[in-house]
Image: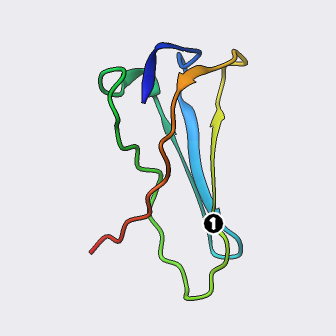
Amino acid sequence: MMKDNAAGFTHPVKLGFEIPNVIEEEREEDFSELGPKDKWIDVPVGQFTAPHNAGQMEMHLSGTESLVWKKGMVFAGAVIRSKN
């Protein structure tokens, strides 16, 4: 959710995940163009197929261009869904 006082999101940010020795995926998302403020939204990060004992998954969000501090983003959690 982006709060009404959100700031610093004038450039896209990088979203990504990594499963060590299996896959790493990254993409850009422009949060300034996502739905209305103060409403929960789903933001897909990527798709993957992991072997049975893939290990720990890491997710990240980072700025791409602006060195401006960011504020006003609220995370409720991460959901991993099956495609089928």
Quadrant location of residue 13? Answer: top right
Label 1, residues with CA under 10 Å away: few <14, some 14-19, many ≥20: few
Q: Position of residue 30 (x, y in %)?
A: 46, 28
Quadrant location of residue 2? Answer: top left
Along the line of sight, the residue nearer the viewer: 14 or 42: 42
Along the line of sight, the residue nearer the viewer: 78 or 83: 78
Picture residue at 63% right of the left edge, 75% below the top: 22
- Residue 19 drawn above or below residue 64: below
Tally of numbered discs: 1
Residue holding disc 1? 57
Q: Which quadrant is home to the N terminus?
A: top left
Along the line of sight, the residue nearer the viewer: 63 or 1: 1
As drawn, is 43 to the left or to the right of 67?
left
Tell which residue pokes out farthest to the left in this image.
Answer: 84
Picture residue at 48% right of the left edge, 76% below the top: 49
Q: Which quadrant is home to the C terminus?
A: bottom left
Q: Position of residue 15 (x, y in %)?
A: 56, 44
The image's colour scheme reads: rainbow
Q: Amino acid under label 1?
A: Met
Tell which residue pokes out farthest to the bottom in this image.
Answer: 52
For mark 1, give the secondary structure. Answer: loop
Picture residue at 40% right of the left edge, 43% below the top: 43
